[in-house]
Image (cartoon, rainbow, N blue to C red):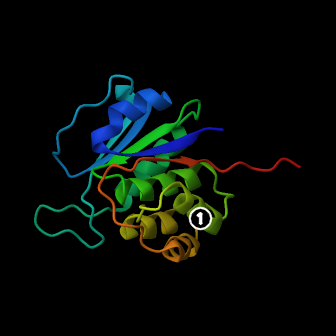
Amino acid sequence: MTAIVVSPLSRIAELAVRHKAVEMVSLLAKGQDFHRPAVISRDRHLILGVNDISFAGTGDLIAPGEAHVAAIIDFARSWDRSAPLLIHCWMGVSRSPAAAVIASLAVHPEEDDDVLARRLREASPYATPNARLIEIGDSMLGRNGRLIRAIAGIGRGADADGNAPFVLPLYAAVEA
């Protein structure tokens, strides 16, 4: 079974190599420069210019929108799952955990939202998924409010220093 590796920007190269990731999603402010790790295929690197805000953007801030979530869903569904998917944002606490949950449900829509939210909390006591990404993902994935309620149910994560990557295992169906 493979997984989604969630990372702060500062540790993407280390974690890509350690987990043998070749695909990556980056959620950073538009124009924020960084180097893609050499082990990540250029054509399998989704870059989304989005700020970590939960309200409509003002000025230079770009709020997560449907186009961002659609890109995460499409990218996750095209992921071959032969190696972990690396998802990162600046600190690995808000945008990337939200994207990881959305990606997980995109590839395993049969998963129970509450079980996924608890698995996220077990993987990271710090994760506080971006509410706007979660709301849009809930709608686009047809969760009918279940994802929003499940993520709200685990509450805000503990304060983080931006150095707490984690691995979110994918849903493992029990074979009958």
Residue at 52%, 72% (x, y): give it. Answer: 154
Residue 122, percent across and down? 56, 59
Position of residue 3 relative to residue 38, above or below, is below
- Residue at the location (41% across, 56% down)? 69
Q: Residue at x 69, y 58 (%)?
A: 110
Where is 13 relative to 150, above or below?
Answer: above
Q: Position of residue 104 (x, y in %)?
A: 56, 52
Query: In this rendering, does residue 24 appear at all?
Result: yes
Query: What residue is shown at x 27% (from left), y 62% (from top)?
Result: 52
Residue 107, above or below 12? below
Please, what secondary structure does the residue beneath circle 1 have? helix
Q: Nearer the viewer, residue 170 or 60?
A: 170
**Mark 1 sits on what residue?**
118
Residue nearest the observer in this picture, 68 or 15? 15
Amino acid carrying mark 1 in the image: Arg
The picture places residue 65, in percent across and down from the top left corner, at 33, 62
Report if residue 44 is visible in the image: no
Spot occupied by residue 72 in the image (x, y as percentages of width and height): 43, 49
Pick the quarter of the image with the N terminus.
top right
Give the side of residue 109 with respect to residue 11, left or right: right
